[in-house]
Image (cartoon, rainbow, N blue to C red):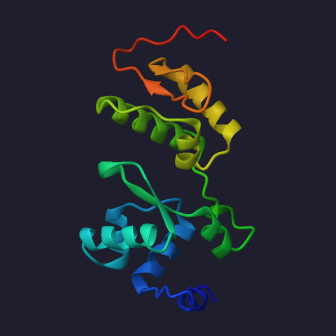
């Protein structure tokens, strides 16, 4: 039904598109190496197909940077295609994996001199809600004093301090 609807809307899906979508219905994310293996094409072909699925079709969202780049199935499409009652299809990554990913991104951004992460960006990365991100970051900051408190307001960001100093945040 999905393929027929997409065809009516002018989106002709290839076997490669369907293989990646099928994989993402069972896994939280895919990287270019895995996608290349799944579709049995080169990494550059896999990246091109994933880019098309992101930019042209709007099926996937890109996360991470460089070698850590990964793609996830858009929430609305995942919900539309997956049957209810299958916990293995839940797209939320577990707490420890979320901590590891956020910490890695914070460190990478600090190394490149880029700004840290906002609550909204962390929600995109982890697929958690606003309050879950606040709890996640509270735990992560307790474990890693190098992470600065975000401040308040729209532009508040969690930052990794390279020198290891931390804010004197006692609330």
The residue depicted at 61 percent of the width and 52 percent of the height is 92
Image quarter hosting the C terminus: top right
Lateral position of residue 90 relative to residue 107, left or right? right
Q: Residue 148, how many percent across, how many down?
A: 49, 20
The residue depicted at 45 percent of the width and 26 percent of the height is 159
Question: From the viewer's perspective, is residue 108 above or below residue 22?
Answer: above
The residue depicted at 46 percent of the width and 42 percent of the height is 101
Q: Quadrant of residue 154?
A: top right
Question: From the viewer's perspective, is residue 61 above or below residue 35?
Answer: above
Q: Residue 74, how many percent across, how many down?
A: 56, 64
Q: Residue 42, how many percent across, how many down?
A: 24, 73
The residue depicted at 40 percent of the width and 37 percent of the height is 104
State the residue lying farthest toward the front.
154
Q: Quadrant of residue 111?
A: top left
Q: Residue 152, how many percent across, how many down?
A: 61, 24
Total labels: the figure holds 0
Image quarter hosting the N terminus: bottom right
State the residue lying farthest toward the right.
85
């Amino acid at each position: 039904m999905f393929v027929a609807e997409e065809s009516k809307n002018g989106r002709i899906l290839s076997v490669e598109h369907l293989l990646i979508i099928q994989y993402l219905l069972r896994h939280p994310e895919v990287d270019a190496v895995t996608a290349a293996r799944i579709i049995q094409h080169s990494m550059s072909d896999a990246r091109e197909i994933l880019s098309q699925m992101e930019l042209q079709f709007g099926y996937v969202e890109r996360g991470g940077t460089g070698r850590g780049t990964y793609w996830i199935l858009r929430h609305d499409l995942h919900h539309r295609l997956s049957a209810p009652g299958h916990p293995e299809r839940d797209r939320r990554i577990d707490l420890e994996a979320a901590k590891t990913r956020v910490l890695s991104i914070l460190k990478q951004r600090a190394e490149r001199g880029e700004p840290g992460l906002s609550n909204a960006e962390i929600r995109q990365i982890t697929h958690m809600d606003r309050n879950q991100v606040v709890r996640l970051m509270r735990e992560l900051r307790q474990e890693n004093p190098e992470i600065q408190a975000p401040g308040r307001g729209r532009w508040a960001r969690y930052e990794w301090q390279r020198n290891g100093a931390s804010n004197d945040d006692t609330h």
